[in-house]
Image (tube, helix red, strand yellow):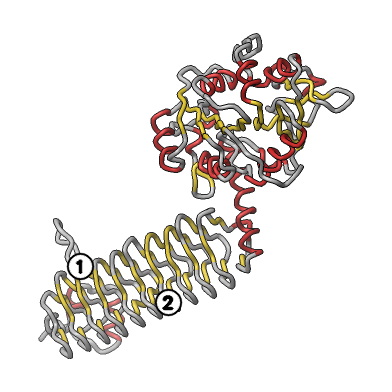
Amino acid sequence: MGKSLDALDVAIVLAAGEGTRMKSKTPKVLHFISGKAIIDHVLSQVIKLNPGELRVVVGAGREAVESHVKQVAPKAIPVFQAERNGTGHAVQLALADLKVSGTVLICAGDTPLLRSETLAQFIAAHNEAKNTVSVLTAEFPDPTGYGRILRNEAGEIVAIVEERDASDEIKAIDEINTGVYLFDIESLRSSVTKLKSNNSQGELYLTDVIADIKATGGKAAAILSNDYSETLGINDRSQLAECAAIMRDRINYEHLLNGVEIIDPTTTWIDSSVKIEADATIFPESWLAGTTTIGANSIIGPRTTLMNVTVSTGASIIESNCVDCEVGSGAKVGPYSYLRAGTKLGAGAKAGAYVEIKNSTIGEGTKVPHLSYVGDAEIGSGSNIGAATVFVNYDGVEKHKTKIGNEVRIGSDTMLVAPVSIGDGAYTAAGSVITDNVPAGAMGVARSKQRNILGWVLRKRSGTKSAQAAKAAGASESSE
């Protein structure tokens, strides 16, 4: 195939199928793969070809599909196929009010692995050969379920036979129809009106157009793809998983080439929208999703999930879950931390083991080392939040804010009952329930004086091992 990108007048994406084998209430083309709906991947590659007009044939789940397409491809024109009567019928509808002439690309909305580079080569080869119709084909290791390509002794395409209508001899052919076509619009317009539904499905097959175009003097060709995996379609969940694994490997390969260290690419899942700088390291069983960006020299994982997270240079996130948050340069998260929406961890800050933070700003160098909950807070720089501290931000009706200054020391097992402020350099005593503001440099103490009731165990728990141990240590039953 040639490599030049020739002009494309119209593109039609067929996305009206019921997708019954998915066994889902969600339209097939709206199932996700690598962070995007299946149809998003198709549309993004077609749009790169800069077609003069883009039409999407919708049917099952019309409202949801049309709404989604409008978001990702605002210029696309939806065409509704109320009765799913085959690909030929779908194309008839798409051409109904089309005024332009030239070349039209037709492809399926369930082939997310197809690349624009392959389509560009296909278009160049079609134009160079001056074909009336070209079919993109592939040689599949297992062609089951696909239409087979019939060629004559000269290698020219004769027909495409759907598997349901194929003999055992034809089923043995491994060259299949990928569902990607290029047509001269005027020839297609003429031939598609002649389609008949005399087949096992009782539908209008677009593939039958080829025989009519050849019979009327048109030139048809089957052009073999270099990579069959690009043309894989999705009809059920197993095929969705198969395509997702191929997409995963493709994405990881690109990151590896760009200098990212991925320890185990087979267990690392990175959405197509994620950006990672060179010299970042991703450990096994991690999932990076959404608009996540990873800075250089960062360490992610193992077993870490990041969704829409900005990770700055040199940060580390180990065995943790982070969503809609920011992790500053050199900051450390985990293990077993949960950073929720609105969290901003400053440079060199720490959210340690079993720490949960939401909607809070943690200042530069501040540490929340372990077993704490921080919610709706603003914490300055250089502070330390002791183990088992809880920011009591919810009164049962509304959320309230806690403000903590610079170089503050919060004692272990402190309850900070919002709204409350702790001034710069202040301390709180371990085990305190702080309900009032603590001024700068002060020590906040909010706990009752300890009282020891002597002999209680011997009187109330006599006969227990505790009582035996206490008696052996010299305890008596006398009280204060």
Q: Comparing marks 1 and 2, which lies closer to the viewer?
A: 2
Disc on res. 331: 2
* Residue denoted by label 1: 392
> Amino acid under label 2?
Ala
Residue 475 rendering spot, x and y as whole percentages = 23, 87
Position of residue 193 relative to residue 182, above or below, is above
SS at mark 2 in the image: loop
- With 372 as the anchor, is 206 left or right in this view? right
In front of the other: 274 or 323: 274
Count of marks placed on residues: 2
Identify the image quadrant of the C terminus: bottom left
Q: Using the rendered image of the protein, determine whether residue 333 is visible from the camera's viewpoint.
A: yes
Q: Position of residue 451 (x, y in %)?
A: 13, 83
Q: Is residue 241 visible?
A: no
Q: Position of residue 236 (x, y in %)?
A: 57, 33
Q: Is residue 267 above or below residue 155?
A: below
Where is residue 361, by image quadrant?
Answer: bottom left
Q: Quadrant of the N terminus?
A: top right
Q: Position of residue 414 (x, y in %)?
A: 22, 77
Q: Name the residue type under label 1.
A: Val
Identify the mark at residue 141; answer none if there is no mark.
none
Residue at 48 percent across and 17 percent down: it is 83
> What is the C-alpha distance between the residues marked 1 and 2?
25 Å
Left or right: 345 as drawn, with respect to 240: left
- Front residue of 293/303: it is 293
| Residue displayed at 56% across by 42% down | 50
398 in relation to 345, above or below: above
Q: Secondary structure at mark 1?
A: strand
